Amino acid sequence: MTSPTGRLVGLLAKGAAPIAVAVAVQSAGNLAFHSVVGRMLDPDAYGALGAVLAAMLMLGVPLGAVQTAASALVAEHGPGWASARRTLRSVALWSLPPALVVLAGAPFLRDYFHLGSLLESAQLAPYLVIAAVTAAARGLLLGDKKVGAVAMTYFVATAVRLGLGLALVIPLGITGALAATVLGELAALAITLRPLRQPDAGAASSTLRLSAVAHAGFAVTGLFLFSTVDLLLARHHLIDGASGAYVAAATIAKTVLALPAGIMAAVFPRLLAGWLKPGRGKVLLNGAIAVAGPALLGGLVMVAVPTLVLRILYGDGYLDATGLVRTLASVAALTSLVTVLTNAALARRSWIVVIPWFGAVLEVALIELWHGSATQIAACSAAALAPTLLLMVLLEGRAWIRSPRPAPEPALAA
């Protein structure tokens, strides 16, 4: 019988390794970015920065569906620059109206997150367009099995963000740190153009359709809202340095979800292929071990030594957030199981993908009722996780344990 470690190694060896390594480097770079910037800015300013960065991630999350659909397009029709060019142009056009809405709402975002200038919130608009096109480009490369090229985009984005971010935060503060994040995505997009330029091998009419990403976008967005909305509400409700402490703890805790997200890209096709076959329960179990295993291990480390992690990353100014790190790291680790089960539901196109949306609504409701301290907000996040995870395990787990329905037998000839 294959051990859990063996299952994880097997999945990595079959295509996920470059992206897993790239995501690990990106996560380390993200922690380094937050660590240095958190030391340069005062806690209140750092809390504002963390909220806007979380909003950037939230705007970009539905683009994971764009990446998946673009990958499927190339796998079905074959690669080619003409098809890639049409796809990138379509995605840019689709993302332009939402970006304009975000730009028009920049004054509201500035006031809601207590930002110092309109430019800080307005940068969300170009980020949305650039991140959308970059996600599509990565999907096109993944569909052509150019995993190394996709991994390189993560390396480049991380390097640009770190280099420019640390240089710009001194003269420009929050604006400089946000600009570096936008430029990092732009650099990643530039890296994709060369490997995408190749003779056309696919059908001339192949292009990405908006309907192809709708279902996946719904599932992915609900999952991200469920795992991140607490950070945004913490910035709104907490004052002074309390929001900075929450952002620091949440940034550390949610890092445990980064590597599993990369591995999930390799697990999801297995869920698609295994749903209608005998032994599909084992497929789901193996996927859960591969994805949630690293998250649970990382969560245990953070729960065991939160003071050490905080001191290394942020210095002594955030040591009062050790309890927050323990709570939020536990929540993040268990949320990785919700991630696996949501993707399992997505693989079989089930309505169960709506459950994380209900979890996010419950989390918002609880936080709106109890937000007097960072500890209360963290407790509300944990309280919303419990019923969400339980429902996912009961409903989705049962679906995968049941034997698949046999294919209908052909009618007998008369």
Image (cartoon, rainbow, N blue to C red):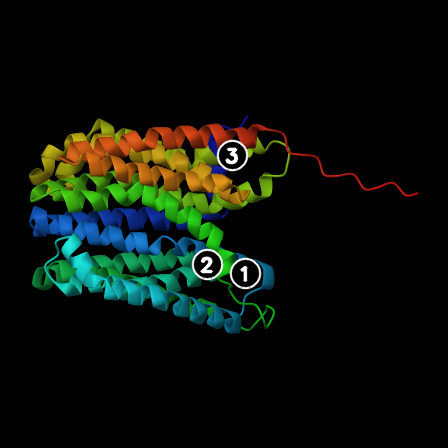
Q: As shown in the figure, which amino acid type bears the numbered disc 2?
A: Gly
Please report the residue visible at 84 percent of the width from the left and 41 percent of the height from the top: 411
Considering the image in quadrants, where does the N terminus appear?
top right
Do callouts 1 and 2 mark residues in contact (Cβ within 8 Å)? yes
Q: Earlier in the sequence, mark 2 or mark 3?
A: 2
Pointer 3 residue? 284
Please report the residue visible at 50 percent of the width from the left and 44 percent of the height from the top: 346
Label 2 element class: helix
Residue 389: where, in percent of width, then height? 39, 31
Residue situated in front as seen by the camera: 96 or 16: 96
Residue 2: where, in percent of width, then height? 52, 28
Considering the image in quadrants, where does the C terminus appear?
top right
Mark-to-mark CA distance, 1 and 2: 9 Å
Q: As shown in the figure, which amino acid type bears the numbered disc 1?
A: Leu
Residue at the right extreme, as displayed: 414
Report crowding for label 2: few under 14, some 14 to 19, many 20 or more residues within 10 A (C-alpha).
many
Pointer 2 residue? 139
Q: Earlier in the sequence, mark 3 or mark 1?
A: 1
Pointer 1 residue? 73
Report crowding for label 1: few under 14, some 14 to 19, many 20 or more residues within 10 A (C-alpha).
many
Mark-to-mark CA distance, 2 and 3: 24 Å
Q: As shown in the figure, which amino acid type bears the numbered disc 3?
A: Leu
Label 1 element class: helix
Residue 298: where, in percent of width, then height? 30, 34
Residue 199 visible to the viewer = yes
